[in-house]
Amino acid sequence: MTSGIHTPRPTPRRPEWAAHAIPLCVLPSSLWRLGALFVPGDWYATRLTVPAAFSLVFLSVFSEALALLAFGLVRPWGEVVPGWIPLLGGRRVPPSSPRRSARSRSSGSTATSCSTPRT
């Protein structure tokens, strides 16, 4: 570890694999959304408006970014705020913060995917 932050015990193998699997599980839907935009002559791509196309790109990037945040649950930077963050660097992260964050991410991702425009 280059940051000098040490966890009291190493992360078990299963949670580590799960954290790596989460972004990979989100990736196919993101690629499908982006592929629907860029396939020439596709029925779906010809009926999309610019705001709808923007929302598909935004949803793909947003969902993948949220999926990558799962690494914070198994890495030391999920336990201690990195030192380069002003005023908070080096402080412990309260255990309830990742749970609240995960709940809001899952709710936001669900709400965003349910509100995707249909044509």
Image (tube, rainbow, N blue to C red):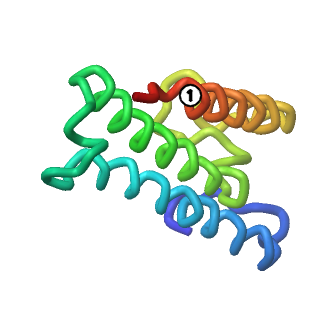
How many numbered callouts? Answer: 1
76 to the left or right of 30: right
Q: Residues within 10 Å of mark 1 (few under 14, many from 20)?
A: some
- What residue is at 55 percent from the left and 24 percent from the top? 115
In the image, residue 37 sits, relative to residue 18, either above or below, namely above
**The one of 38 and 20 positioned closer to us in this rendering:** 38
Farthest residue, direction front: 43
Q: Residue at x 66, y 33 (%)?
A: 110
- Which quadrant, please, contains the C terminus? top left
- Is 37 left, or right, of 69 in this rendering? left
Q: Quadrant of the N terminus?
A: bottom right
Could you say which is closer to the camera, residue 76 or residue 33? 33
Q: For residue 6, which quarter of the picture?
A: bottom right
- Residue at 64% from the left image edge and 52% from the top image edge: 70
Q: In this view of the protein, which residue sits in the foreground, 84 or 68?
A: 68
**SS for tag 1?**
helix
* Position in image of residue 11 (x %, y %): 78, 70
**Percent of width and height locating residue 18:** 72, 68
Residue under the point 71% across and 60% down: 74
What residue is disc 1 on? 112
Residue 37 x %, y %: 25, 45
Q: Nearer the viewer, residue 39 or 61?
A: 39
> Which quarter of the picture shows residue 14?
bottom right
Does residue 72 appear to the left or right of 26 in the view shown? right
- Counting from the top left corner in percent of width and height, residue 54 is at 29, 28
Q: Tag 1: residue type?
A: Thr
Q: Residue furthest left?
A: 40
